[in-house]
Each structure stands twice: as structure tokens, then as C-alpha cells.
Amino acid sequence: MTEAQVTKDQAAVIGPVVDMLRGMLGAARAAFNRHSYASLEELKSHQAALSQEFSRVTKQLTPSAQLSGEERASLLRLQSILHQLQLISENIGGLADPIQRKIKDGILFSDKAVTQTNFLFSLHAGMLRSVLDTLTTDNDFLKKYMAQEGENLIKACSDFATEHEDRMIEGLCLPQAAPIFLTILDRMRAIGQHEVDIAGILTKKG
């Protein structure tokens, strides 16, 4: 792929990465909901494949002296987005450990915690789709939507943690579930921050 092709069709570079990230999210969600070791292994397999994809794409996106200023800016922006997506992949992969502990020890979450976790999975899947849509359309409304939704998602993680503490005090949650749920929320919050950062990169001109 030439640099000119990269600057012309950034979505073609990002698309496979976003699809694989959504696959990771889907596997993590299935492992969480079904207590499925098979889905957990699928998550790890997706992460390994994605790591190879990041390495492949990174090698393709080495700037050359022939680039114009505009092309170089587009390439650097794409590299920045890929870096944020790589950090997202690490945090989705980081969900494997708390989910594995949940499965291994047969720990059940409250209905509220299950609903909240699935809500976050859905939001993140939508946000990743928005990354690709925004790259394809360069739509200012989508950029603002991404930034606002990302901030809302981060706030939701904090609110869910506070609500969980209240449920603990009321005796509505198993004590063993608390550290697992809070670890999941921390990962979800980190993913949200990287999505906000991507929105900032997409919004920045030049």
C-alpha cells in the first residue's frame, strides 16, 4: 500500500482492525454471560491475531520523504488512531482475567451488575463502529457524537461503581463479586477514554 492510498482510504486500513476489536468484545461478552471457557479462548485468539495485524499495518505506514505535508499529517493521524485502537485491544484483552476468575469460582453477579456490564459492552461495540463511520464520512456530527458518548460512557462506569458500593452495603451483592466487577469497570472506563481520545484525533485539523 502506498502512502497516497493510505491518505485516500484510511477506512480500508482501520476497517479490519475495528472488525477484530468488535470480535474481541463479542467473545468477552459471551464468556461473561455464559461462563464459557470456549469464548474466553476465542477472546485470546482474537487478541493474538489482532496483535499480528497491528504489526503488519504499522510496517506499511512508515512515512517517506516523498510525502506532502498534507499526506504526512493524514498518515500521522492514522498512526495515532491505530495506537489508541491498540490500547483498546489491550484493555479488552484485560477483561479475560476477571472473567476467567468469575467462571472458575462460579461467581454470580446481581441482575443489576449483569445489565450494566452488557450495557457497556453494547456501547463500546457501537463506539467502535462509529470510529469507522467517522473515518469514512469525515462527518462533524459523528465526531461530536463520539466525544459525547465517550464521556457519557466514562461517567457511567463511575456511576456503576458507586451504585455497586451501595448494593454491597445493602447486602445485595456477593462480596466475591466486588473486585471482579470493579476490575471490569476499570477496563471499560479505560476503553472509553481511548475512544474519547480517538474522537479528539478525528476532530483535530492538520
Image (cartoon, grey):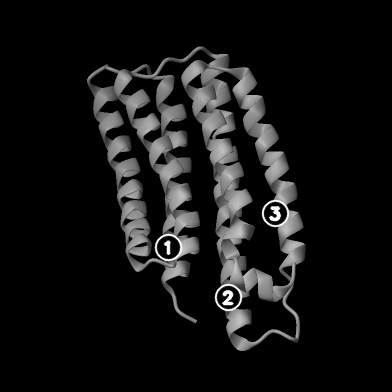
Q: Looking at this rendering, what residue extends furthest in the top direction? A: 106
Toward the viewer: 172 or 127?
Answer: 127
Q: Is residue 8 above or below residue 149?
A: below
Amino acid of disc 2: Ser
Number of numbered callouts drawn: 3
Please state which of the two labelled residues, at mark 3 or mark 2, is closer to the viewer: 2
Q: Residue at point 66% right, 40% down?
A: 47
Quarter residue 54 falls in: bottom right
Q: Secondary structure at mark 1?
A: helix
Horizontal side of 27 relative to 195 (left or right) equals right
Answer yes or no: is residue 147 visible: yes
Quarter residue 139 falls in: bottom left
Place of residue 12 in the rendered image (x, y in percent of width and height, measured from the top left):
62, 59
Q: Residues within 10 Å of mark 2 (few under 14, many from 20)?
A: many
Q: Residues within 10 Å of mark 3 (few under 14, many from 20)?
A: some
Toward the viewer: 145 or 198?
Answer: 145
Toward the viewer: 157 or 137?
Answer: 137
Q: Secondary structure at mark 2?
A: helix
Answer yes or no: is residue 94 visible: no
N-term mark: 1 or 2? 2
- Asked whether disc 3 touches disc 1, contact meaning CB atoms under 8 Å apart, the reply is no
**Residue to which mark 3 is pinned:** 54
Amino acid of disc 3: Phe
- Asked whether disc 3 touches disc 2, contact meaning CB atoms under 8 Å apart, the reply is no
**Residue to which mark 2 is pinned:** 74
Q: Residues within 10 Å of mark 1 (few under 14, many from 20)?
A: many
N-term mark: 3 or 1? 3
Q: Is residue 101 above or below residue 3?
A: above
Q: Residue at point 61% right, 43% down?
A: 20
**Residue to which mark 1 is pinned:** 199
Q: Residue at point 33% right, 52% down?
A: 149
